[in-house]
Amino acid sequence: MDPNLLTLFKLSLILAVNTLMTRGLSDADGVDQSFTQQPWLLQCNQTVLLLEMERCGEQFSSDMNHVHPEDRCNLTHFIREYHVFSSCTEKNAERIGCFWPNPAVERFIISIHKHFFSNCSLDHAVFIDPPDDTLILLIFIPVFLTLAMVVLVVWCSKRSDILA
């Protein structure tokens, strides 16, 4: 067999395998690459973004009307509604070509929080840092124990011939 033909065959085989491998790793296969799904091609339109956020907010308001006002401070009672709201804002922002979260979306989400969750107060104690003396002890005791263990291991490894 001709050596040039064998080299050409090897080269084409490597190229074919490389193409198949990189194509298998590509995320673009079978995905609709429409214009609205490529945010880097769009400019963020703040007006459209705010209109879409209002639509998400209206849906969230409608969903939250089904939650009793006393249960609005307990996330377990409305976690599904909040997830739908959060997903709605994220998907619409990305569809329009805006980053999520961005300042406009954050302001909108804060206004939603103020509207629905302003009466939620902390019923439990607010945790504060321990006194400095306690904090120093809690930090230095594990540090010194770790150093002592390292010294003990090194000392025992040097004396292994005597202890054995």
Image (cartoon, rainbow, N blue to C red):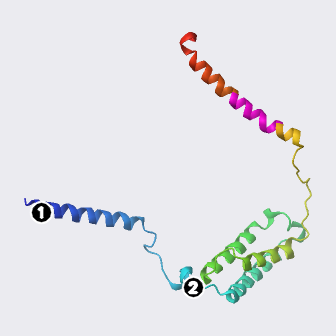
Taking the spot 68% from the left edge, 88% from the top edge, the residue there is 48
Q: How many marks?
A: 2
> Visible in this render: residue 91?
yes
28 in magenta: no
Q: Give me the residue at 63% from left, 84% from top.
A: 44
Kindly identify which numbered label has been placed on residue 101: none
Q: Which mark is residue 42?
A: 2
Mark 1: amino acid: Asn
| Placement of 147 over or under 69, stated as above or below | above
Which of 12 and 83 lies nearest the eye of the viewer? 12
Residue highlighted by disc 1: 4
Q: Which residues are magenta?
A: 137-147
Q: CA distance from mark 2 to mark 1?
A: 50 Å
Residue 155 sits in which quadrant? top right
Residue 145, picture quadrant: top right
Which of disc 1 and disc 2 is earlier in sequence? 1
Q: Position of residue 65 (x, y in %)?
A: 83, 77
Identify the image quadrant of the N terminus. Answer: bottom left
